[in-house]
Amino acid sequence: MDRQRVAREFFWNKQPRKIMAVEAKTGRVLWTKTSRVSPITLAAGQGRVLYHDGSKVVCLNSQDGNELWSSPPAKTRRTVTMNFGPKLVDNSMHAVLNRQNVR
């Protein structure tokens, strides 16, 4: 798809989405959480699920979906299109995963 067309026509509507953990072997849903999730920010690893909710980075426990911490407000572009969103970068994620007691 043409990059300029995407920038003009496909915007993130900021509506809440369902985040869920599913047991791979059985397909059983372990937990669900409803939250805004900025495009292409959902990441999981080391027992954590991270995403940008449009205003901050949120970290959930991957076992139960409970929020472990959230960052102070993190700026984004004024308009977020579906293929260009805030990114959680591997090295940054590693540093973020090692933070404790962030609220």
Image: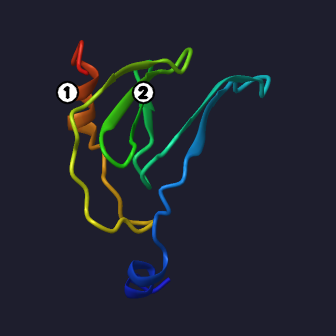
User: Residue 12 at what x, y percent from top left?
Assistant: 46, 63
Q: Residues within 10 Å of mark 2 (few under 14, many from 20)?
A: few
Name the residue rendered at 77%, 28% in the picture: 27
Which color scheme does this rendered protein use? rainbow
Query: Which residue was labeled with disc 1?
Result: 95
Q: Is residue 4 above or below residue 83?
A: below
Name the residue rendered at 44%, 24% in the picture: 60
Horizontally, residue 29 falls left or right of residue 43, namely right
User: Residue 43 at what x, y percent from top left?
Assistant: 42, 38
**Contact (CB < 8 A) between labels 1 and 2?**
no
User: Residue 75 at what x, y percent from top left?
Assistant: 21, 51
Q: Residues within 10 Å of mark 1 (few under 14, many from 20)?
A: few
Q: Earlier in the sequence, mark 1 or mark 2?
A: 2
Name the residue rendered at 70%, 27% in the picture: 24
| Front position in the image: 28 or 70 | 70
Q: Amino acid at mark 2?
A: Gly
Q: Amino acid at mark 1?
A: Ala
Q: Which mark is residue 45?
A: 2
Q: Is residue 22 above or below residue 77?
A: above
Name the residue rendered at 31%, 50% in the picture: 87
Q: Quadrant of residue 39?
A: bottom left
User: Residue 69 at what x, y percent from top left?
Assistant: 33, 21
Q: Disc 2 on helix, strand or loop?
A: strand
Q: Which mark is residue 34?
A: none
Q: Is residue 26 above or below residue 92?
A: above
Horizontally, residue 39 falls left or right of residue 94, namely right
The image shows a total of numbered marks equal to: 2
